Image (tube, rainbow, N blue to C red):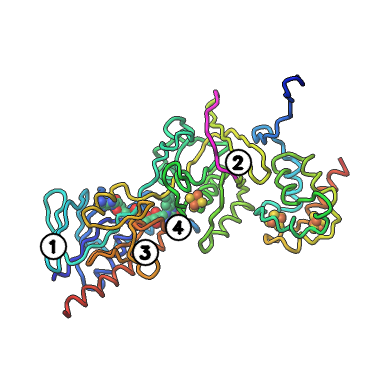
Amino acid sequence: MNRFGYRLSPSSQIDLDVSDNSLFRDILAGEPGISTCIACGSCVASCSAGVFDKISFRKALHLLEAGMDTEAVALLEGCMMCGKCTLVCPRGINTRHAIVLIKRKLNKG
Amino acid sequence: MTDRVLIIGGGPAGLEAANQLNLLGYKPVIVEKEDILGGHLAKWDRLFPEGERADTVLYKLIKPVEHTPVYLNTIVEKADKEGNNFRVKLSGGKEEIVSAILVCAGFSLFPAEKKEEYGYGIYNGVITSSDLEKWFKTGKGVNINNPSKVGFVHCVGSRDEKVCNRQCSKVCCVTAVKQACEIREKFPDSEVFCFYMDLRMFGRKYEDLYLKAQNKYRVRFIRGRVSEVSEDFTGKVVIKAEDTLSSKPLKVSLDLVVLMTGMISNNSIEKISGILSLNRAEDGFIEPADTITKMYDSGKEGIFLAGAVTGPKTIPETLSEARASALAIHNYLSKKTIQ
Ligand SMILES: Cc1cc2nc3c(=O)[nH]c(=O)nc-3n(C[C@H](O)[C@H](O)[C@H](O)COP(=O)(O)OP(=O)(O)OC[C@H]3O[C@@H](n4cnc5c(N)ncnc54)[C@H](O)[C@@H]3O)c2cc1C
Ligand code: SF4
Ligand code: SF4
Ligand code: SF4
């Protein structure tokens, strides 16, 4: 295969027919505000750790909803729980609480 | 000089203008090409943002003008200026002498079958927003049977150079959100998706409706223009788009796809603008003489404009314009009489 320069890559498609977003729904039950995210990016722009690490609450939320948990959680790994993002969210989402719930869920299971 | 005013089009704009002209002491005459009054409003079930019944609004507009002369199934064939008046020939052979003409001919819906890749008229599971309104109102037209997944496709025939409509139709974002909530209300077990490029919630209380769609009805908003719709062997319609917020291709199989067809210029506007020598803009809509301070002014003496004939508009905006036009006609005719 190498000779032709081909490579088999896993599909990056979001297939909503098979995606399982049970983690998202669990978090939603504990922090209902997350359904109102408007993807403005304020949380990411204000993140104090964001310049050092690949942190994006916006995208993490979005990927969780699409059932891409591993990719989502990787975007919250460097979070220091400072809560700055909660201060700026225009929808008033308790983003820090949502992050706490996500981390708690993952540590348990 | 007569006190008669010809109104072309008996939709919300024409009806409200007729009422105001009556109140100002003039004798409006409505010419309507269809067999009923009400224009597009007569087709809608409930109105955004608060779910007001379209029938109730229509009744409020029609009731005050029930004694106003109306020619149904009629269009204007010819209009000649004779001194201060117009001699107007109508289809069917009738003639009217009037001192002013108010053009309230409204808009047309974008014909969804023109966007072939969306499969309207090809797949049973693909309908338009206007089909859905009709179904909500009468239960007729299309067959909707307890769908478990429903998708709304924004900007169909709008913001699209490929179909020569660059303009935003303005009302379809909020209509999609309204209809998405209504579907969730009717079918509580359904999942509903809106595929949008931008969400244009410009009006008062529209954002509230959007918030309700998110937190009460759990409508999923996916940012990305739908590229194509196809049908699988089970009869489901499969939508493909890019989820631009995660930069990933996305696919979902749905039971029902609703195309938010845009507002385009009235498909008989060429004839009307030809007869009355009105200017049209690049988007096909009639161009007023002054788009900021005098939306009602056609630039031609004695000819006035109101409503969606000059571009996409909501009903409250249309009604305000109708009142402004009635007043402008009053000012025009009073000046004429003094001279
Ligand atoms: C899917 C959809 C849903 C909508 N929902 C809402 C809503 O919930 N709330 C809201 O505020 N707005 C809504 N709108 C917008 C609303 O329909 C328009 O604002 C309104 O209809 C404009 O009124 P009009 O009188 O200018 O034009 P129209 O309603 O188009 O009426 C024009 C009239 O003129 C007649 N006519 C046309 N050509 C001629 C001719 N040559 N001679 C004689 N008569 C002619 C037509 O038959 C028609 O009766 C919606 C629009 C769409 C597309
Ligand atoms: S709580 Fe985490 S994600 Fe939010 S601003 Fe602080 S470090 Fe960034
Ligand atoms: S700031 Fe709030 S609304 Fe904006 S992207 Fe972050 S969570 Fe969503
Ligand atoms: S109102 Fe929304 S759906 Fe309609 S054309 Fe504009 S952006 Fe597209």
Left or right placement of residue A46 versus residue B330 in this view: right
Q: CA distance from mark 3 to mark 2?
A: 36 Å
For badge 1, the amino acid type reads Ile
Which quarter of the rendered picture does the C terminus of chain B lie within? bottom left
Foreground tag (3 vs 2)? 3
Residue labelled with disc 1: B97
The Cα–Cα distance between marks 3 and 4, rounded to whole angstroms, is: 16 Å
* Disc 4/disc 1 C-alpha distance (Å): 39 Å
Give the residue number, with chain letter if any, for mark 4. Answer: B52
First along the sequence among labels 2 and 4: 4
Query: Which of the numbered marks, if any, corresponds to residue B191?
Result: 2
Q: Position of residue B310 (x, y in %)?
A: 35, 58
The residue at the point 76 percent across, 42 percent down is A23
Subunit ID for the residue under disc 2: B
The residue at which mark 3 appears reads as: B319
Say which of marks 2 and 4 sits in front.
2
> Closest to the observer: B299 or B315?
B299
Q: Is residue B66 magenta?
A: no
Query: Are the residues under marks 2 and 4 on the same chain?
Result: yes
Decide: is B74 above or below A69: below
User: At label 3, which amino acid type do we have?
Assistant: Leu
Sequence order check, earlier mark of 2 and 1 = 1
Q: Residue at (81%, 50%) from the top-left corner?
A: A101
Please check the rendered image and state whether residue B232 is part of the magenta-colored stretch, yes or no. Answer: yes
